[in-house]
Image (tube, coloured by chain):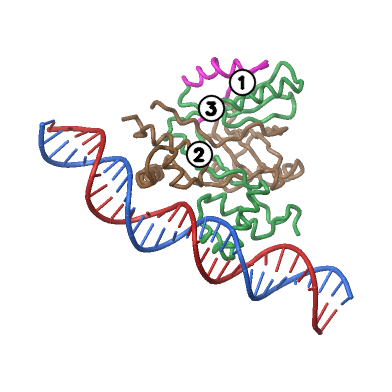
Chain colours: A brown, B green, C blue, D red
Amino acid sequence: MARNGFDAIDRKILREIQEDGRISMVELADKVGLSVSPCLRRLRKLEESGVIRKYVALLDPAHLHLGVNVFVTVSLTQHDEPSLRRFETAVQAHPEIVDCYAMVGNQDYMMRIVVPDPASYQRFLSEVMMKLPGVANMKSSFTLHEVKNSTTLPVSDID
Amino acid sequence: MARNGFDAIDRKILREIQEDGRISMVELADKVGLSVSPCLRRLRKLEESGVIRKYVALLDPAHLHLGVNVFVTVSLTQHDEPSLRRFETAVQAHPEIVDCYAMVGNQDYMMRIVVPDPASYQRFLSEVMMKLPGVANMKSSFTLHEVKNSTTLPVSDID
DNA sequence: CGAAATTTGGCAAAATCTGCCAACGCAATT
DNA sequence: AATTGCGTTGGCAGATTTTGCCAAATTTCG
């Protein structure tokens, strides 16, 4: 058996539900070559194992008047555990901050912000970002357009 | 009526399905204060309008042995339309490149790569990234850990 | 080779989805 | 103020899907 306990069928299921999270068991079972019962049982197991985090609908930012993406790198004044935790907790509270990663090297964090327009970012920058706890330095880079924004992870055949 | 034709109930629906893409019409209708029929009709309308791009399952990268994220900035040698298009098309073909944005400024790109480990990135860098059409310059930044990776867009009350 | 454990497939009841139709509310018009 | 017309709602019924259960089949392991 494979390292993570996924066999070929499990991987097929994972690939399918990444593309269509609302697929019916009937159709999914058919696609992976099982009958409905074992297919559902495998799906439940995958959900319980935590590989499947959640099911969501993906919305189009343009339709919601959220067409402006800004990448921001942040460095903190202090790097002790409590300071990092305080900053990361504050980040979680703001839905405009859609992504945030702790970085190796001199920039501590890389984040992506979603706002309606540049003016909104101006406001968000001064009213929220600047007030995040422990920020020493910040650098913003605006995006021109989205080329790709995928939630589909490559599920390896091996492993 | 609001600018995009969404009323309070539509926005409620959008917020709910962003959090649970598999919610049943019965439960959704209950949460937004409608009966099932009009709720489903509104959802279908939202789907057809394009606000709802798709329904997906979100997987946990760690469980799939995809724990390493790398941010890469790229600049191209030429910035004419065909060169840009060629590059962006090539980007679409690789599932390891999960995000890619064209940036304001030096006309370059910011992308996020997902790989199993640093060694894999080394390989991906030389075998794929370096061979992307028209690349002049590339700079990779490794992440330490994920603080936030959200697909939930803030659906404004106004607008 | 044989026993135990796991996985499968089909069935039936419960729940859900989906299309249809009458009723309701609201706005514009007379 | 009454009426007309448009859009939205709610309930109902048939079709589909989900879900738990059990016997059969397959795999695992001594």
- At label 1, which amino acid type do we have? Lys
Query: In front here: B97 or A18?
Result: A18
The amino acid type found where label 3 is placed reads: Glu
Picture quarter with the C terminus of chain A: top left
Q: Determine whether label 2 and label 1 are within 8 Å by CB.
A: no
Q: Quadrant of residue B149?
A: top right
Q: Residues within 10 Å of mark 1 (few under 14, many from 20)?
A: few
Q: Is residue B158 magenta?
A: no
Name the residue beneath numbered marker 1: B139
Q: Which residues are magenta?
A: B119-144
Residue designated by label 2: A18
Give left or right: position of C2 versus A109.
left
Q: Quadrant of the N terminus of chain A?
A: top left
User: Relative to the observer, which residue lies in front, B84 or A88?
Assistant: B84
Depicted B131 relative to depicted B111: above or below: above
Q: Which residue is the site of mark 3?
A: B96
Q: Secondary structure at mark 2?
A: helix
Assess disc 2: are there few (<14), some (14-19) or many (≥20) residues with their C-alpha within 10 Å of its C-alpha: many
Query: For numbered disc 1, what is the local secondary structure?
Result: strand
Q: Earlier in the sequence, mark 3 or mark 1?
A: 3
Quarter-of-image position of residue C18: bottom right
Look at discs 3 and 1 and give the one toward the viewer: 3
Q: Horizontal and vertical percent for residue B5?
A: 73, 55
**Kind of residue at disc 2:** Gln
